[in-house]
Image (tube, grey):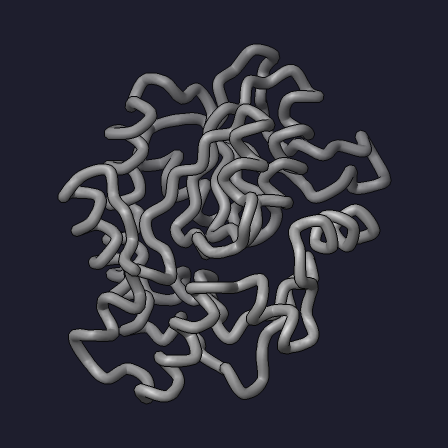
Amino acid sequence: MTALHASDWDRDAALTTARILLEIKAVNFRPEEPYTFTSGWKSPVYIDCRKIISFPRARNRIMELGVEKIGRHIGYESIDVVVGGETAGIPFGAWIADRMMAPMAYVRKKPKGFGRNAQIEGEVPVGQRTLLVEDLTTDGGSKIRFANALRDAGAICEHTFVVFFYGVFPGSFEKMKEMGLNLHHLCTWWDVLEVCRERPYFSEAALKEVRKFLEDPVSWSKAHGGVGSVDEAKLKDAVE
């Protein structure tokens, strides 16, 4: 299986992003000791997009591709305010806002609990069309919470952009779509695997186990002690 892309440009952007992430060692394969996400899913793969902030040339190229993607799929004049999600989305939101010459704000995971008790920092006037920016998404849960906070404040939030989308956990796109939130991303794990065919970044044994996970993430998660259904993930997310 390979990633599906809307156009040749989207595919090229995805593979370029994947190559950069592999080069800066933001990609982690650990089948023997799986990672556990807040939603309860177990995964042999983990992406550390926060490393991008320490590599100026890498981040410049990724942000160029991100703004081009936003322009192609949303429109350059269709966004009034760029909003970063606490905390990883704040630098990415700032770089994108700068390139788009748009105002920037950020949204907290919850009200700060003192002073103005604000959840949104910066000016986001009622009726403004916002672009929610984060570094990545696994199953979309945090995007929905941030989008709801913006909507509760009177903003319009119909689009969210991330550098990396896991693209494997069931219900992610559907869950966001139901909430009226369109996800735009540069690359997924399928793009990383495609680039791994070019150079031996990881052992063939590790790649084989990762492919097994990508083809059936629910069974893989359950077999390794994680949640084994979307309902379980939703329940854990609600408790969190």
Q: Residue furthest top?
A: 127
At a point 24% along the width and 38% down the height, the residue shown is 6
**Residue 100 versus residue 234: which sits nearer the camera?**
234
Tell me if 232 is positioned left or right of 81 in this view: right
Question: In which image quadrant can residue 140 be found?
Answer: top right
**Image vertical order of residue 134 relative to residue 50, above or below:** above
Question: In which image quadrant can residue 226 be found?
Answer: bottom right
In which quadrant will I find the N terminus?
A: bottom left
Return the x and y of residue 200 as percentages of the image width and height: 23, 84
Return the x and y of residue 176 as percentages of the image width and height: 55, 35
Return the x and y of residue 79 as percentages of the image width and height: 40, 21
Return the x and y of residue 187 as percentages of the image width and height: 33, 53
**Image vertical order of residue 86 relative to residue 160, above or below:** below
**Residue 12 versus residue 57: which sits nearer the camera?**
12
**Image vertical order of residue 127 relative to residue 75, above or below:** above
Tell me if 112 is positioned left or right of 83 in this view: right
Number of marks in the rendered image: 0
**Image vertical order of residue 229 relative to residue 117, above or below:** below
**Residue 144 versus residue 80: which sits nearer the camera?**
144
At a point 47% along the width and 49% down the height, the residue shown is 91
At a point 39% along the width and 26% down the height, the residue shown is 102
